[in-house]
Image (cartoon, helix red, strand yellow):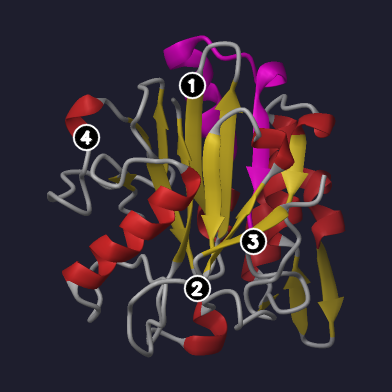
Amino acid sequence: MPFESHIQNGLSWLTSPRLSGVRHGFSTRSGGVSPAPFDSLNLRTGCADSPENLRENFRRFCGAIGADHRRVVLAKQVHETTVRRCTASDAGKGLWSERDYTADALITDEKNLPLAVFSADCGIILLYDPVHQAIGAIHAGWRSCAGGIVEKTVRELERTYGSRPEDLLAAVGPCIGQCCFETDGDVPAAMTAALGEAAEPYFERRGAKWHVDLAGLNRQWLLKSGVLPERIDVCGLCTACRPDLFWSHRKMGEARGVQCAMVSLT
């Protein structure tokens, strides 16, 4: 299903109809208080934007999707495959207190514990198990994608909460598209080593470079993990093509903010 766009008080965000049973959202860059070059709904910690701006931006975005910004748990992303089980003791980490972990994926079955992962081109994926009431949020740039973080997160949901892959609902958010993700041969080689022939439809040789469909590869990992195709939404928007909506590391470098994907049980 196509993602749905929402606008409220100047703030815009996206949702997946597939995840209509759980509070969630994919932020854009509009509707916040941060000045350039972070204008305006910047959710990037550890940059030159002020903590006051960041907290107000999180307050606005969380308010729009119905989540509690004082309890949000932020991923500390290092392009690896660590999956962290989050509990009430993690509430507020990354925004109101220090993160004592690194993790590119977060899972929980706790109510009112929003999980957030970030992107400025990388893949961001939300998972929801409506049967066992468990959720996951995944940051899957190409390194984590090739490392199998999507499948690892599905297995952790299964091991920790009893989730069955066929019950999971998944939304693959905005990321850099094949139109703009131009690479050398290392990325296709890593994907082929991880996924075999199933990876081949998702990269194309154009002259001396390869163009890679990161969203398609992350969807392929979901299928490999046992998630049913009819239970997966893919946004399809390219972060590099839409500077009006998103930040892109490839197009903007480090002078930028980030968008996030967030999910919370009620």
* Amino acid of disc 3: Pro
Is 197 left, or right, of 103 in this rendering?
right
What secondary structure is found at the residue carrying circle 4? helix
In primary-sequence order, the first of circles 4 and 1 is: 4
Q: Give the range drawn in magenta.
A: 150-174
In primary-sequence order, the first of circles 4 and 3 is: 4
Q: What residue did someone put label 2 on?
A: 29
What secondary structure is found at the residue carrying circle 1? strand
Q: How far apart are marks 1 and 2 (CA)?
A: 28 Å
Q: Residues within 10 Å of mark 3 (few under 14, many from 20)?
A: many
Question: Magenta stretch: residue 263 in it?
Answer: no
Q: Where residue 23 is drawn, which disc sits there? A: none
Nearest to the observer: residue 261 or residue 203: 261
* Amino acid of disc 4: Asp
What secondary structure is found at the residue carrying circle 3? loop
**Image quarter of residue 253:** bottom left
Q: Where residue 174 is drawn, which disc sits there? A: 3
Q: How far apart are marks 1 and 3 (CA)?
A: 23 Å
